[in-house]
Image: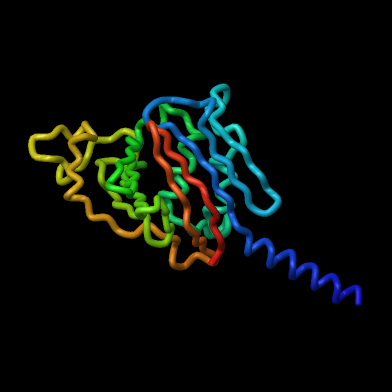
Amino acid sequence: MKKTCFFSLFFVAVFALFTQEVIIDMRYNVLRPEPSRDYFNWASGNRRIQDSYNAVTGASAARSTREFDSIRFDTMTSRRYTLPRGIRHILLFPVSSRQYTDNFHLTVQEEGKKLRIRFIVYGTVYQIQTDDDKKIDIRTGCFLAENITERNSPVSPLRARYVKPGGNASDINALDWDKINFVPDTAAPEASRKYTGVLTAGYSNGVLTINGVLDLL
């Protein structure tokens, strides 16, 4: 009886571990620094993390940059993406140095009732698209294009083929978006676990918010 009970409890514990939802709540002022108001709060299982940028250490106060890897990867050995790469990047903007994130040229554009979020991280352009209700389906609303810049570093000139005629490759505003070939940004097909879910975005007076719940498929 004790053995049966033990294995039952073990199975329940393991099942709970791999069916945990992730609750997301994030705020970031796109237009100007607001470290005292920007945040990235998230919860999974028994973890409840309230995070923001720590100016003293120059890093995230609750170490979400590292701790969120338990959500981002299926295991810490295989390190296969469980969700779109762009989702992880955008969520960490509030807990990173502004001097660092300003290199990523984050923009939020309103297109009718939709929002289009774009940024560049280490030579890869990310685009996150909402529907008319400001919903982001992480399986269908995220896109990327790699090798847009000469080097995969925070500061690097654009590759010549992506520059507008007569533009300066060192000026991100010279990027010709019509030449970008976006592909879906999704979880890795071979990942042993993957997240699904719909997040709600908001944008008002330069402030971007994203919140919602992610569930394992």
Q: Nearer the viewer, residue 3 or 77?
A: 3
The image position of residue 77, as x and y in percent, is 57, 57
* Res 76 → quadrant: bottom right
Q: Quadrant of the N terminus?
A: bottom right
The answer to whether 194 is drawn above or below residue 159 in the figure is below
Any part of residue 202 in sight: yes
| Residue at 58%, 53% in the rendered image | 22
* Res 75 → quadrant: bottom right
Colouring scheme, one of rainbow, by chain, secondary structure, one colour: rainbow
Any part of residue 81 in sight: no
The answer to whether 194 is drawn above or below residue 22 in the figure is below
The image position of residue 50, as x and y in percent, is 62, 38
Q: How many marks?
A: 0
**On the picture, is 172 further left or further right than 209?**
left
| Residue at 49%, 35% in the rendered image | 94
Q: Nearer the viewer, residue 180 or 127?
A: 127
| Residue at 34%, 46% in the rendered image | 115
**On the picture, is 201 further left or further right than 52?**
left
Q: Looking at the image, which residue sits at the far right?
A: 1
| Residue at 20%, 40% in the rendered image | 175
**On the picture, is 19 further left or further right than 9?**
left
**On the picture, is 10 further left or further right than 33?**
right
The image position of residue 53, as x and y in percent, is 54, 30
Q: Looking at the image, which residue sits at the far left?
A: 166
Q: Nearer the viewer, residue 58 or 130?
A: 130
The image position of residue 95, as x and y in percent, is 52, 34
The answer to whether 75 is drawn above or below residue 53 in the figure is below
